[in-house]
């Protein structure tokens, strides 16, 4: 779902790394331990994480655009409120992902510049126009459903902030500061997120029937 840059590739620089550190790192990953921001990690691992996490964040932010285009044109106030909550959710997810990626030593400005220059990519499904209100329903049912299936494996990634990110976002909760060593609690939240999932969260903004003005009134 998340595309990668297939142009302008350069040969990766070879960096001499301590074999003992690499062996210890790989042993931790094989033992299903979390790698935390202050832990030693290979440079290739760090760069791959920055690329993947920034692409995920960009996709959340760009994903707001086709739905946000319909906030002012929603059929009624209830649907407008639900759509507002959904767009707000996606914006919050993107900001959390940027913050988590920043634990790897990059900055939000660098990630944004990479997106604007074309070096970083995002999910291309959001390039399709939303010409009718029915397209909003298709996004909620098909695009979001595919995203959930794509992102559930993130709960099993080896990088702690990203793994906790995946569990929280699938349960539509936000964690404490990214990078905290919260292993036991996070594993509990992983299970809870798998049980409930994103679709069980209630809208952040609620509109009742009395809030909707009848036609012609």
Image (cartoon, rainbow, N blue to C red):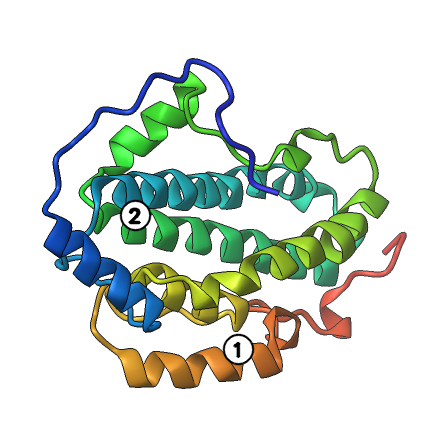
Q: Secondary structure at mark 1?
A: helix
Left or right, residue 157 beside residue 184: right
Location of residue 31 in the rendering, given as x and y in whole percent from the top left corner: 32, 73
Q: Which mark is residue 101?
A: 2
Q: Nearer the viewer, residue 42 or 121?
A: 42
Q: How many marks?
A: 2
Q: Which mark is residue 82?
A: none
**Residue 208 seen in render:** yes
Location of residue 49 in the rendering, given as x and y in whole percent from the top left corner: 34, 46
Location of residue 87 in the rendering, given as x and y in whole percent from the top left corner: 56, 51
The Cα–Cα distance between marks 2 and 1, rounded to whole angstroms, is: 22 Å
**Residue 80 seen in render:** no
Residue 216 vs 32, above or below: the answer is above
Image quadrant occupied by the N terminus? top right
Left or right, residue 42 beside residue 202: left
Residue placed at 80% from the left, 49% from the top?
138
Residue 207 vs 5, above or below: the answer is below
Location of residue 213 in the rendering, given as x and y in whole percent from the top left corner: 79, 61
- Within 10 Å of the Cα at label 1, are there few (<14), some (14-19), or many (20+) other Cα atoms? many
Image quadrant occupied by the C terminus? bottom right
Residue placed at 66% from the left, 45% from the top?
71
Q: Residue furthest top?
A: 8
Q: Quadrant of residue 130?
A: top right
Residue placed at 60% from the left, 69% from the top?
198
Please report whichever mark, 2 or 1, sits nearer to the chain's N-terminal start: 2
Residue 208 vs 165, above or below: the answer is below
Left or right, residue 204 beside residue 72: left
* Residue at numbered disc 1: 193
Q: Residue furthest right?
A: 216
Tell me whether the residue at label 2 lies in contact with that at label 1, contact meaning CB atoms closer than 8 angstroms.
no
Q: Secondary structure at mark 2?
A: helix
Residue placed at 34% from the left, 16% from the top?
10
């Amino acid at each position: 779902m998340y595309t990668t840059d297939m142009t302008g590739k350069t040969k990766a620089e070879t960096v001499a790394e301590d074999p003992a550190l690499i062996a210890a790192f790989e042993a931790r990953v094989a033992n299903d331990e979390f790698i935390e921001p202050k832990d030693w990690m290979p440079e290739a691992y760090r760069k791959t994480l920055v690329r993947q996490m920034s692409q995920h964040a960009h996709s959340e932010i760009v994903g707001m655009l086709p739905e946000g285009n319909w906030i002012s044109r929603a059929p009624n106030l209830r649907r407008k409120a639900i759509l507002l909550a959904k767009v707000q959710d996606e914006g919050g997810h993107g900001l959390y992902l940027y913050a988590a990626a920043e634990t790897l030593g990059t900055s939000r400005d660098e990630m944004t510049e990479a997106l604007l220059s074309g070096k970083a990519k995002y999910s291309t499904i959001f390039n399709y126009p939303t010409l009718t209100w029915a397209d909003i329903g298709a996004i909620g049912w098909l695009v979001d459903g595919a995203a959930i299936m794509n992102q559930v494996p993130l709960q099993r990634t080896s990088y702690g902030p990203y793994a906790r990110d995946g569990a929280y976002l699938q349960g539509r909760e936000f964690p404490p500061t990214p990078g905290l060593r919260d292993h036991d609690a996070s594993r509990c939240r992983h299970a809870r997120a798998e049980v409930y999932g994103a679709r069980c969260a209630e809208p952040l903004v609620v509109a009742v029937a009395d809030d909707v003005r009848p036609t012609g009134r």
